[in-house]
Image (cartoon, rainbow, N blue to C red):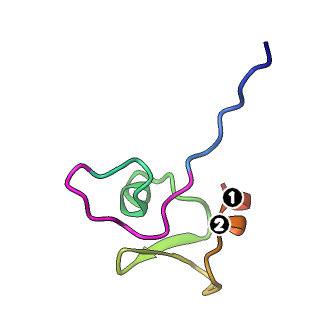
């Protein structure tokens, strides 16, 4: 059998504000320090520090 490689969890692009916050919540990941480099959260939305647009392709590369 082939070994499964552990992939990094990608954050959601926006916080869903659920009572039981999920593991991919950008606010939770920011607090835990597991958010990818170059990303932060403003107004419950995931944003890039350099101001560029957040895309899933770039996010996958960063994680």
Circle 2 packing at 10 Å, graded few (<14), some (14-19), many (20+), is few
* Residue at the top extreme, as displayed: 1
Q: Secondary structure at mark 1?
A: helix
Q: Quadrant of residue 49?
A: bottom right
Q: Secondary structure at mark 2?
A: helix
| As drawn, 7 above or below 47 | above
* Residue at the bottom extreme, as displayed: 51
Residue 36 belongs to magenta span: no
Q: Residue at x 60, y 87 (%)?
A: 51
How far from the left and from the top, in percent, is residue 42?
40, 79
Query: Which residue bears the numbered disc 1?
Result: 60
How far from the left and from the top, in percent, is residue 54?
61, 76
Q: Which quarter of the rendered picture does the C terminus lie within?
A: bottom right
How far from the left and from the top, in percent, is residue 12?
48, 62
- Give the magenta range: 10-20
Majority secondary structure in the magenta region: loop
Q: Residue at x 24, y 49 (%)?
A: 20
Query: Which residue bears the numbered disc 2?
Result: 56
Q: Residue at x 80, y 18 (%)?
A: 2
Q: Residue at x 29, y 52 (%)?
A: 21
How far from the left and from the top, in percent, is residue 43?
35, 81
Residue 16 belongs to magenta span: yes
Left or right of 50 in this view: 34: left
User: Considering depth in this image, is 12 or 29 the residue closer to the camera?
Assistant: 12
Left or right of 3 in this view: 27: left
Q: CA distance from mark 1 to mark 2?
A: 6 Å
Please give the label number shown on residue 51. Answer: none
Q: Which quarter of the rendered picture does the N terminus lie within?
A: top right
């Amino acid at each position: 059998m082939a070994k499964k490689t552990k992939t990094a969890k990608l954050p959601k692009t926006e916080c869903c504000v659920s009572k039981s916050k999920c593991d991919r919540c950008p606010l939770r990941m920011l607090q835990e320090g597991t958010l990818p480099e170059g990303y932060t959260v403003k107004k419950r939305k995931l944003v890039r520090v350099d101001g560029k647009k957040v895309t899933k392709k770039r996010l996958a590369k960063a994680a």
